Amino acid sequence: MNNLNSIAKGWFSEICDMWPGIALSIEIERVLFSKKTRFQQIDLFQTKSHGKMLVLDGIIQLTEADEFAYHEMMTHVPLFAHPDPKSVLVIGGGDGGVLREVGRHQCIESIDFCEIDDEIIKLSKKFLPKIACGFDDPRISIHIEDGSRFITRQKNRYDVIIVDSSDPIGPGEKLFEKPFYLGLKNALKKNGIIATQGESFFIHKEYVKNLVKITKQLFPVQAYSYMLVPTYPGGHLGICLASLGPELKQPARSMPENFQEKLQYYSLKIHRASFVLPYFAQEMIDGI
Ligand code: SPD
């Protein structure tokens, strides 16, 4: 675990230079898994109130209690914005949560999945079966590789690309830089859409501005959405979206029958609402 982070008196505190002066604390029952891999420190805790909690380099990636909010929004906002997604790439998210959500779309024919650290996949399959069930889909091809390298070989292949990254410290750093976004653009088919982990407009203003600047420079259509997640800093997280054509703020398809009842957060109504930002955040984005 990150040196700065600690478990004191049975509480895990998430302390990070990216959000100075604040820390979210969660009460822990026990440590289920702890390992330093080639890429990062992985910890899995049984919490008292939020089920299991996955932590990478001391930063909370998910808890079983609220992972649905992040995974549903990261996935269904870009997929419902596309009129006919058939080919999808997911970069990062070795827990399988985004894959689980992608798999709900029957219209999708192939799903490429690229993850740098296969230890996360193994851990999720063992300890987080309700999330890792995403890996059971026969349409998935798994590539264990750094996403920033994988993307350089992909041209004109995908209708939708979802980047489920950790924060821009450690192995996720390159996934927040312009060359990677150029790779994403080149990997898209005509009318393709990207959705990337967009940090917080309250806490990470400089990161958000940089992502918006990059996507505005490279793509004809750009938009920023967000969802509520109580166990992320500030209780919310943004999605940076961009497309080669389709409008992003309106769903382009209706929802198949029986789809909504399997979800807890996403709906076509919240799709539209998630792009309505607080005044200061919209001003910040419009000013770029
Ligand atoms: N500050 C933490 C942001 C984490 C985003 N990625 C979560 C991965 C879950 N699949």
Image (cartoon, rainbow, N blue to C red):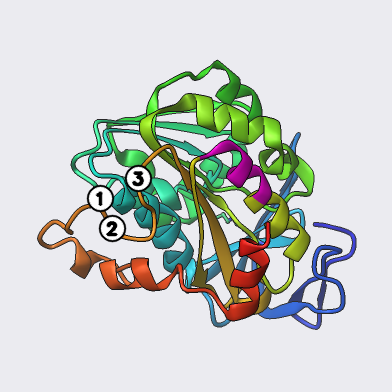
Residue position for label 3: 246
| Mark 1, secondary structure of its residue | loop
Q: Position of residue 175 (x, y in %)?
A: 66, 40
Whole-angstrom CA distance, mark 1 to mark 3, is 21 Å
- Identify residue type, mark 1: Arg
Span of residues in magenta: 213-219
Whole-angstrom CA distance, mark 2 to mark 1, is 16 Å
**Which residue is outermost to the left?**
257
- Graded by Cα atoms within 10 Å as few (under 14), some (14 to 19) or many (20 or more), the crowding at tag 1 reads some
Give the quadrant of the N terminus: bottom right
Q: Position of residue 76 (x, y in %)?
A: 35, 55
Which quarter of the frame holds ligand 1?
bottom right
Q: Is 36 a magenta residue?
A: no
- Identify residue type, mark 3: Pro
In the displayed structure, 150 sits above or below 9; it is above
Which numbered disc, 2 or 1, marks the residue closer to the eye? 2
Residue position for label 1: 104
> Mark 1 vs ligand 1: CB under 8 Å?
no
Pointer 1 with pointer 3, Cβ within 8 A: no
Which numbered disc, 3 or 2, marks the residue closer to the eye? 3
Q: Nearer the viewer, residue 279 or 26?
A: 279
The quadrant where residue 278 appears: bottom right
- Graded by Cα atoms within 10 Å as few (under 14), some (14 to 19) or many (20 or more), the crowding at tag 2 reads many
As drawn, the label of residue 169 is none
The quadrant where residue 43 appears: bottom right
Residue position for label 2: 251
Give the quadrant of the C terminus: bottom right
